[in-house]
Amino acid sequence: METGSARPKAGLIDWIGLRWFFLLLSSSIGQKFVMGVTGLLLCGFLVAHLAGNLLLFAGAKWFNDYAHKLHEQWEFLIIAETGLFILFLAHIYLAFSTSFGNAKAREEQYAVKQTKISGRVIGANTWMFASGAVVLGFVLLHLADLRLGADGINLRGFKYTDDAFGNTLMVLKNPISRAVYVIGSIVLGIHLSHGFASAFQSLGLNHPKYMPLIKIVGKVFAVVIAVGFASIALFAPEIWRGYVPVSH
Amino acid sequence: MNHSTSKTLNLTLKIWRQAGPDQSGALKTYTLTNISTDMSFLEMLDVLNEQLIANGEEPVAFDHDCREGICGTCGVMINGQAHGPESATTTCQLHMRKFNDGDTILIEPWRAKAFPVVRDLVVDRSAFDRIIQSGGYVSVNTGGAPDANAIPVPGHMQKDAMAAAACIGCGACVASCKNASAMLFVSAKVTHMANLPQGQAERSKRVLSMVATMDAEQFGNCSNTAECEAACPAGIKLSNIAQMNREYMKALLFSCE
């Protein structure tokens, strides 16, 4: 078999032995593979994050103990946050890269386009870039609210203290913040309703025995994550209406 | 779609007319009367073309060859669906009884950067040929015919390979995909040979080379919407794309290619 003309000539990248890595991040299949891996790892983060945040329902002591123990392990936290940052960055880069490629692949559009899948509702799988963009916006706002900031004031001007529980309630008490958090959670759920199962297909893990289960787990996971986070934003400030923040 | 009860149809056609690759095109409206419901879709276009020739106009160019649904030459978008409303059916095997009297039918060429319009409804699908040229074959010498059952092939592998080999390369997968992705076509070729003994020697090189050519031809990526599977007249399954993804990653990370 002759090597196809599409295969590039040997260059520096071959000399340092990184051709495979270059193809992993530039070929159509490699990109979707990395997209799937990063997506599933971010799903893992969501599970841990939701589990921790559901302690908001348990009360100030539980949540603050959890938050303080987490932040005490700063060495671990640096690694975890760096890892998360890389996952987000790769996932976002690939979203742009694949979407640009897709847009270029059909410049002239059809006058009319209809699905041939009976009963298909044009939904999450058509809007992955848009739902991802909304989730990104929400994550940035969430970071500005509760992660970034210095000297007791966050990037939105809220004063915060060591009382992580109180800080969270303070953010969620603002009705606009609350609405944004609920919408962000729901759009995240929509993103996951396609993303979770689709990641398995991109990794090549499509098997007649397991695919029906993976699809069901994907939908259930999306609902659990969306309802879980949205319920915190909706109900936590109501349940703890009388809470007086502790200041140190 | 309701089956037509009348024996003949009066139709309004809106057809993409484009004189050449570099010319701009537009939809043009035609009316046809007394079209028999027994006609195939392409026969209906033949009637239109005879009418156009009689009027001294340019006939509508469209691709066709066997008209038996096996060659993969025909294929147009009919009311926004590749090969029209029927599943597992090529344009030539679509019959006018699937339409109703008074229908307006919109006919467009396949649209993809990699499939430039040559004229009217004809597109240049040589990008598919170049993908095949880059690895969609077996070049090892397999010698004389071996004894029966000397090389065991598990039944399910043989069935998967046969099902993938049913691809006729019509391009409906690309046409129906929102990203104009050729994954279903390429995956059918890759899995067809990856599942058979003859394909093993070049298994890694094949998938790397064919995917590289597919990307260079500027087909889009897979969003896993399954429109290709629904549009495919040969019944190629989405699971082929998953197998191609596996084949590609195995070849990229673990082969010496």
Image (cartoon, coloured by chain):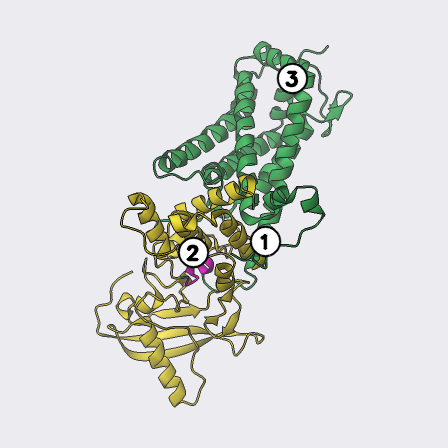
Chain colours: A green, B yellow
Q: Nearer the viewer, mark 1 or mark 2?
A: 2
Cα distance in 3D space between marks 1 and 2: 38 Å
Percent x, y of residue B190 = 44, 51
Q: Nearer the viewer, residue B156 or B40?
A: B156
Parent chain of label 1: A
Task: Check disc 2 and give the amino acid type.
Answer: Asn
Residues indicated by labels 3 and 2 sit on the same polypeptide chain = no
Could you tell me which secondary element the residue under label 2 belongs to? loop
Q: Is residue B15 left or right of residue B257?
A: left
- For mark 1, what is the residue? A101
Indicate which label's residue lies in the foreground, 3 or 2.
2
Residue named by callout 3: A164
Q: In the rendered structure, does residue B146 fall within the stretch colored magenta?
A: no
**Alpha carbon separation for disc pair 1 and 3:** 43 Å
Residue B141, label in figure = 2
- Does the image show residue A116? no
Q: Secondary structure at mark 1?
A: helix
Is most of the magenta stretch helix, strand or loop?
A: helix
Which segment is the magenta one?
B169-176
Q: Are marks 1 and 2 in contact (CB under 8 Å)?
A: no
User: What SS does tag 3 mark?
Assistant: helix
The subunit carrying tag 3 is A
